Image (spheres, rainbow, N blue to C red):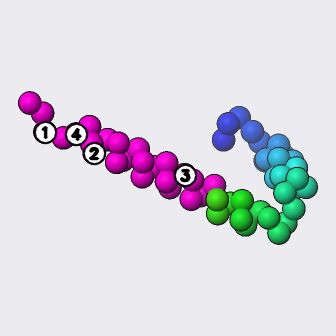
Amino acid sequence: MFGLGMGELLIVLLVVLVFFGGSRLPKLGSSIGEAINNFKKGMKEGNDKNDGPKT
């Protein structure tokens, strides 16, 4: 994954935990997941509009 090994991922996770704190991580994860879902929905809706009748 992005050329990162297990050690590097563990360090990144530790840094994120220090910056955001344990209590804010679930909210952060939820917000990121919701943003990704909205982005995917917007991309799909944009493609549906472009696939309309061709004249």
Instruction: Check disc 4: other Cα within 10 Å, few if <14, some if 14-19, many if 20+.
Output: few
Task: Find numbered disc 1 in the image and state the secondary structure of the residue it sits on.
Answer: loop
Residue 21 position within the rendered picture, expressed as x and y whole percent measured from the top left: 87, 62
Extreme right residue here? 18
The earlier-in-sequence mark between 2 and 1 is 2
The earlier-in-sequence mark between 3 and 2 is 3
Task: Find numbered disc 4 in the image and state the secondary structure of the residue it sits on.
Answer: loop
The residue beneath circle 1 is 53
Q: Is residue 20 above or below residue 46?
A: below
The residue beneath circle 4 is 51
Residue 51 position within the rendered picture, expressed as x and y whole percent measured from the top left: 22, 39
- Residue range corresponding to the magenta coloring: 32-55
Q: Nearer the viewer, residue 52 or 5?
A: 52
Q: Looking at the image, do the residues carrying marks 3 and 2 touch, with CB atoms under 8 Å apart?
A: no
Q: Give me the C-alpha separation between circle 1 and circle 4.
A: 7 Å
User: Which three-letter amino acid code belongs to the residue tagged 2?
Assistant: Asp
The earlier-in-sequence mark between 3 and 1 is 3
Q: Nearer the viewer, residue 13 or 8?
A: 13
Q: Give me the C-alpha separation between circle 3 and circle 2.
A: 18 Å
Extreme bottom residue here? 23
Query: Is residue 37 visible in the rendered structure shown here?
Result: yes
Q: Looking at the image, do the residues carrying marks 2 and 1 touch, with CB atoms under 8 Å apart?
A: no
User: Which three-letter amino acid code belongs to the residue tagged 1?
Assistant: Pro
Q: Is residue 41 above or below residue 50?
A: below
The residue beneath circle 3 is 36
The residue beneath circle 2 is 48
User: Which three-letter amino acid code belongs to the residue tagged 3?
Assistant: Ile
The earlier-in-sequence mark between 3 and 4 is 3
Q: Give me the C-alpha separation between circle 2 and circle 1.
A: 11 Å
Instruction: Check disc 2: other Cα within 10 Å, few if <14, some if 14-19, many if 20+.
Output: few
Task: Find numbered disc 2 in the image and state the secondary structure of the residue it sits on.
Answer: helix
Task: Describe residue 40's horizontal placement relative to residue 24 as left or right.
Answer: left
